[in-house]
Each structure stands twice: as C-alpha cells, then as structure tokens.
Image (tube, rainbow, N blue to C red):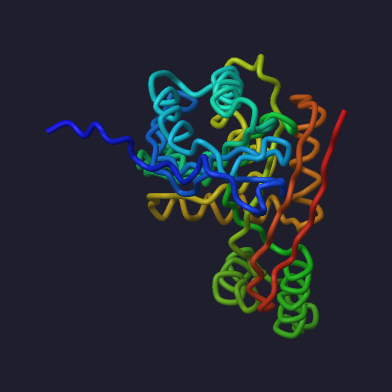
Amino acid sequence: MTHKIPLPDPQSESIALDHIALDWVGMQGITLPVTVDSRPLHGKVDIGVDLLAESESRGIHMSRLYQALESLTSAELTPALISQFLDDIKKSQSGISSDAFIQISGQFLLLKPALISDLSGWENYPVNISASVPRGISQEIKVPYSSTCPCSASLSRQAIQQKWEQDTILGNEVITRDQVSLWLKENASIATPHSQRSWARVKIFLDKSEPIFPIKTLISQVENALGTAVQTAVKRVDEQAFSIANGSHQMFCEDAARRVYQALRYTHKYTAFDIEVIHEESLHSHNAVARVNYKK
C-alpha cells in the first residue's frame, strides 16, 4: 500500500540555535571499496561539510553525501576524481555549506620479494588520502623499517675490541689467521648493537592535475632512502642480508628524517611534504622521533 501522507522531516525545521555555524558535519567510518594506484583498497571513509550560520538550517542533507560516495567506486581513485567529487557534494548542500571534506584510509598491500632467496610475501602499508575544498589534496603513508643505533654499534665494537686485547696478550707469539677466525666466531657477539622497529610517516601534497595517487612510487622512494625495509618471508640467507643492511645503514632518527627529506626534496621535487620518523627503541621504553617539512 502506498503512503500518501507526507513523512515528517525534522531536519528542515528551525530551532533556537540554528544561527550557530558548525565547522564539520558528516559521517565517519563508512566502508568503501576503491581502487588506488592500480590496487584494491578496502577503505574507511570520513566525509563531511561545514554548516553556515546564515543558512539558518538545522542540519545538512547527509544522505546525499552517502549516495555520492558510489561515484568513487566506478573508476580508479585519482586527484582529479576526488576534486570533482568535492565539487559535487558541495553543490549537493547548496546554500548551507561552503567547504567539503573527505578522508579515505586503509591498508595498501604489496607483494615484496625477499632480499636474496626466491621467497616473497605481502606487506601492508597504512594509507590515508585526504582532501578538502580549502586545504587541497594530500596522500599519507606509513612505511615500516629497521634502524640500528650508531651509538650502540660503536659501544659494541669497543667492547669486542677490549675483549680481543684481553685475550691476545701473548708477547711476541704470532697469531694465525685461523686463530683470529675462531676467536671471532666465538666472541664477535659478546656485545651487539640494538635495533628497533621504526616508522616513516610521509605526507605529500598533490595538485588535482596529478594522474594518480603515487603510493607505490612513494613507498619505493622512502624504502630506498632508508635501506632497511622490513621483510616478509625469509630464509637464513635473507636474514643475514638484512643484518648486513642494518649494519651498513646505521641511523639515529635525525639521520632517517634527513635521508627521506633528501629523497623527496632533491630527487623527486615534491612541492610540499611532511615527514615524521619514529624509532620504537629497544633500549628505552619511549620512542625517538624526528619531524621535518618542506613547502616550495
């Protein structure tokens, strides 16, 4: 049976406080499958608009925001598509809003080969794409890596050196290569540097003319700059190669931040970016953090 009686619409009613503007009104945590940088992303979306005081509106047309999201699933997500989407939802709130906002977050999966062997496995990278009418479009990723403390490496080498000097007080006796090799095998790990799981959080700002969201490219840039990307499936030969990489790329958080800055600023020339590196220390219960940003 068709209902001919109009349904109530409290949203269109006026209330005593509708002269107060609201900075953000919308929805959070909407599930949305999208394709970004040629890969599927199980996204969670926050979407909203502002609410103007002069509109004297009690609320926004929230269902229009939800329905508009379907347009983001029909093609690969690009800066141009996001920009057009913001224009569309702003128009859907004509007369009551001036700004529109969207944030899409999810886990970007990449199949990563082992360092030496033929193994491979999936690594996930937290991704956050944000856009708003007043602030533009940005892409943020978090890249995990390993960091070996240069100070602890130096202290470890000194301890091994002192042990060697204590064990080789032999006057004029000649020490053979085999004896040195055996001593190293038995004593080279009496002190080891401490390493820690670390994160590089990098946000780049994009023009709507950019053809794609360059997630894979940015991940490669960060991992190549640091040299110690975490691994997935490994054999012992890969684990040894990873240890060598850590020894070859010892870094404080300050070093890591500068490495990523140099890669983004001088090699790829992004117009603006924010960098934060976090070393979740194994020596301390607190983290070591460094931040740097750039804007042309």
Q: Residue 10 location in percent, x, y? A: 46, 46
Q: Residue at x 42, y 50 (%)?
A: 232
* Number of marks in the rendered image: 0
Which of the 4 image quarters holds residue 258? top right
Q: Residue at x 63, y 54 (%)?
A: 199
Give the residue at the far right of this rendering.
296
290 over 92 or under it: above or below: below
Judging depth in this view, the residue of 267 and 172 nearest the camera is 267
Judging depth in this view, the residue of 116 and 61 nearest the camera is 61
158 over 228 or under it: above or below: below
Which of the 4 image quarters holds residue 208? top right
Give the residue at the far front of this rendering.
5
Q: Residue 197 location in percent, x, y? A: 58, 61
Q: Residue at x 71, y 54 (%)?
A: 277
Q: Residue at x 82, y 28 (%)?
A: 266
Judging depth in this view, the residue of 228 and 153 nearest the camera is 228
Location of the C terminus by quadrant is top right
213 over 58 or under it: above or below: above
Q: Residue 285 location in percent, x, y? A: 66, 78
